């Protein structure tokens, strides 16, 4: 019977299905400072939060980069050669809260489109 069907997917309970990190607060600068030590074998990568979207590993995505802070992030990852960053879902109702788990995006292709878009969008990027 179709009425008895209950979806048990990864977000079947909405935002309650996600494990969230404690929210980052702009008022407590001590807890928002970058770490000075990194565990052996660990790396610090830039964070690109995206609201309401769950990205899965081994899938391809196109992002339009227009916000100044993310334009700078792309310039930085291009200049340092890493071409990697973390994408994590941002909480829809809690400012500064991000999902505990994210996906590493690898930049495959980048197209500069600021002239064509009147500087509204800086890059169109393909990721895997």
Image: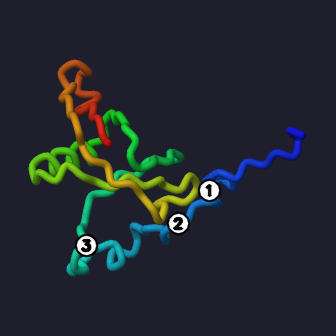
Q: Are marks 2 and 1 in contact (CB under 8 Å)?
A: yes
The residue at the point 87 percent across, 46 percent down is 4
Q: Earlier in the sequence, mark 3 or mark 2?
A: 2
Instruction: Answer with left or right where residue 40 lies relative to residue 102.
Output: left
Q: Residue 85 at x, y = what percent?
A: 28, 54
Identity of the residue furthest to the front in this view: 1
Relative image position of residue 86 (x, y in whole percent): 33, 55
Q: Earlier in the sequence, mark 3 or mark 1?
A: 1
Q: Nearer the viewer, mark 3 or mark 2?
A: 3
Which residue does the numbered mark 2 point to in the structure image? 20
Q: Which residue is mark 1?
A: 15
63 horizontally vs 97: left or right: left
Q: Quadrant of residue 88?
A: bottom left
Callout 1: helix, strand or loop?
Answer: helix
Task: Tell me which residue sits at (10%, 54%) in the image.
Answer: 80
Mark 3 lies on a secondary structure that is loop
């Amino acid at each position: 019977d179709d009425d008895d069907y209950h979806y048990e997917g990864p977000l079947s309970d909405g935002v309650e299905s996600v494990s969230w990190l404690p929210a980052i607060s702009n008022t407590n600068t001590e807890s928002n400072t970058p770490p000075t030590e990194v565990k052996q074998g660990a790396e610090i990568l830039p964070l690109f939060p995206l609201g309401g979207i769950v990205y899965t590993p081994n899938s391809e995505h196109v992002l339009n980069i227009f916000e100044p802070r993310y334009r700078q992030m792309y310039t930085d990852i291009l200049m340092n050669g890493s071409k990697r960053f973390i994408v994590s879902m941002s909480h829809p109702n809690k400012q500064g809260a991000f999902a505990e788990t994210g996906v590493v995006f690898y930049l495959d292709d980048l197209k500069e489109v600021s002239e064509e878009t009147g500087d509204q969008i800086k890059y169109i990027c393909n990721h895997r």
